[in-house]
Image (spheres, rainbow, N blue to C red):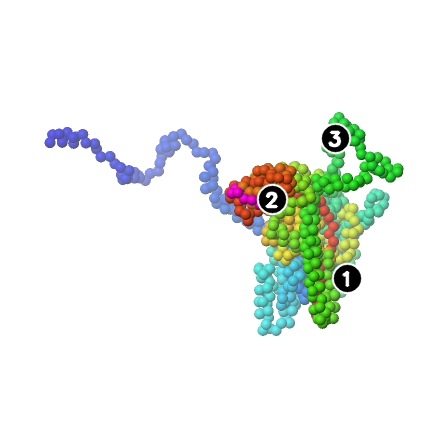
Amino acid sequence: MAKMAENGEKQQAHRPGIYKQKNKGHKHGKHRTKGEIERENKGRVSVMMLTKKQRKEIKKMDRRHKANQLRRNKKDMVLTEKRRLGSRDGPPHLVAVVSLHAGADAGAVTKLLRQEGAGGIVHQERCISGISDSFGIILPRFKQRFTFLNQNTADMHSLLDIAKIADSLLFVLDSTEGWDTYGEYCLSCLFAQGLPSHALVCQGVSDIPVKKRVDSRRALSKIAEVRFPDARLFPLDSEQDATLLLRHLGSQRQRKLGYRSRRSHLIAQNVTFTPNSPAEGTDNGPTGLGTLCVSGYVRGRPLGVNRLVHISGHGDFQLSQIDAPSDPLPLILTAARPTKPGKEGDEEMQDGAETEAPVRVLMKADPSSRENLQAEAEVDPMDGEQTWPTETELQEAEAARKNKRLMKVPKGTSDYQATWIVDENDEENDDVDEESSDDDDNDDMMDEAMDGDDDEANSQELGSGCASEGEEDEEEEEEEVCSTERVGADQRYDEHMDEAAEEEGLKRYREARSHEMFPDEVDTPLDTPARMRFQRYRGLKSFRSSPWDPMENLPLDYSRIFQFQSFERTRRRILAEAAAEEEGAMDGWYVTLHVIDVPSSVMESVQSGKPLVLTSLLPHEQKMSVMHVLVRRHPSNTEPIKSKEELVFHCGFRRFRASPIFSQHTSADKHKMERFLKPDVPAVVSVYAPITFPPAGVLLFKQRDDGVQDLVATGSLLSCDPQRVVLKRIVLSGHPFKINKRSAVVRYMFFNRDDIMWFKPVELRTKWGRRGHIKEALGTHGHMKCVFDNQMRSQDTVLMNLYKRVYPHWTFDPYVPAPLPWFKSEVTVDMHDLDME
């Protein structure tokens, strides 16, 4: 017991755990004294600047107010811009009336709107130069003014030019079908280019019985929803309908198009041409150049007099001065009673026209600060050349003179002329020299020649087969009774067929089908060494990671173009400066631009009835470079489009002809060239063209031999980058002759021993995924021993990939001929078929 007591005295006391209850201290209800606060702060003072967390917490309401202010300012800016259009301070609301069906009459729509104007609204006939069916109307009740023009859809160039600057498009639909095939084609072009604000109208609704009107309108609305899901369909059969339509056009939301909102533009309402006098320069007089005075309303951004201007379809020009004439369509807001045309109203307008205000000069161009028209870089052909020969070169020249070959020349021929006389031996050597030239088309031409030989052989075999069949069936044909009517129909059908075009189409189709089945495969020639035929090609260990110097072996055309150190940075800077620019003719002013050194063909185009669209260019947009466009093939086009084939481009406000190359759209530093434009796959089109800062819509057309232009692809501008590496790939194929596990003897890829040793470092691959290399050459007829990473199959094919860099052709032509409407040719064929029947 004693021992237990002693142990109990030594026992440790209980210690509370982490879950011990702790009661709060008693609150006596008094605030802390000043001394207590100082003792707690321990000498620390309050900060002069709040921390980021405290600042965020305190200014949360301020940030909300700031967001509301920005939202309110943006809304006010949009409303102000919307109210300026068609008002006293802005340009008239430009509305283009476009008929989408052959049975829809756009002239009846403009006539009804003109009658609405005659009922109490002043109107001005032919306010757009070159377009007869155009007029301007003023609505004092709405405090707005409109300019209407009836654009014919047969001229696709004029339709696209008008759609680029029109504030609204008024589509006229058929009351039953909506739009026809050609109307669908026009809509495809307009949507790809960028569609502004639009409205849909149809006539003839009042002629439909009352019981069928609802169903007819519902069916038409269902058709229109395919292209215009949010658009409203307006009937237009009375003056009341015209008033509702005008109210809708004046109040609808305007859709912004990036390529025109960043540039000032105008459509000519009055154009005069003054030829240059011979005293102004010997070059200007005989060439038919002169000064073009273009009057119109400035739209978009302010127009500077020192900037270059582009006339769609004619080129780039300079301005000499800008005048400010009187506004031909003033907005009169007086509460005068409406007058009927032909009476006192016309007399007042004539009196006003007689007392026009004098034209004042707004600004004149400064020759020192005016942008030049230099499109290409100046190239010195002697730049980088050696001016004095070295001793080695002198010795080689002396040796060549001593070993000079004697040849017979005509009497009186000098030594210089004799060097140009071609001998038989020289002709044989020229073939080898042409193979090693710098022209990129040699390989393509040889491939086409090889394909052509195969086609000729096939055609000869086919012809012989047909002849034999014809001999066997002569007796049967004599017994048959031929129909004279059918023979006449066949003859009429053959008269309208172009045999050369048929053969060319067949060749192109076979080539495209062959490329689809065997992509990039090329046959090694038998009569030419492969090391000479493919001397400009090289092998790559990895297409993705192997290096390729973009400045290596550039063509001569690259000395004529311009290049940016950073295109994206330059684009942001120029667009920001253009947005902040406030000098020049402001938006909404009616001005007269004096464009100098303009050819007389521009005035002839205006007199023929085509609209004149003038656009101000941003800095550097007149210079040539390598432009890249991201496009997708249009579903309506089924013909094969080959690389380096001439196409017609509509890029922003420009249109031109050029021969582009196609390549894959990837994020790597090297891009594989595509020989054909594939359907349903985006592709990059590279072409020599003037610099254009994106965004801008692009349309690609292909012109037929008969002048009709077909839409082949649509897309948008991608970038300007001359250093974008586009590699053309060719694939040499061989057949495994003998197989021993991982090694195999391959033949038919080369036909001599030297070619095998030349291409020995290049890696091999097979269609079934094997990889290998050439180990040694066997014999002298092109057999070679190859080793692969795994078992080789007898059904497999050995391939070798070779690459070379390709460049587009310099075939830029700013003058594009006017296209013929393709529906006319369709109508001709249909009528011909009817005659045959």
Tell me which numbered mark, 3 or 1, is placed earlier along the sequence.
1
In the rendered structure, the answer to whether residue 703 lies left or right of residue 197 reads right
Ranked by sequence position, the earlier of labels 2 and 1 is: 1
Label disc, if present, on residue 386 of the rendered structure: 3
Residue depicted at 74% across the width and 68% down the height: 488
Residue named by callout 1: 347
Horizontal and vertical percent position of residue 754: 64, 38
Residue 393 visible in rendering: yes
Task: Indicate the amino acid at tag 2.
Answer: Arg
Q: Residues within 10 Å of mark 2 (few under 14, many from 20)?
A: many
> Residue 196: where, in percent of width, then height?
63, 55
Q: CA distance from mark 2 to mark 1?
A: 95 Å
Q: In terms of secondary structure, where does tag 2 sit?
A: strand
Instruction: Mark 3 vs mark 1: give the one in front.
Output: 3
Which quadrant is the N terminus positioned in? top left
Judging by the rendered image, the residue that carries numbered circle 2 is: 747
**How many neighbours does mark 3 have within 10 angstroms: few (below 14), some (14-19), or many (20 or more)?**
few
Marks 3 and 1, how far apart at CA: 80 Å
Question: Which three-letter amino acid code belongs to the residue tagged 1?
Answer: Glu
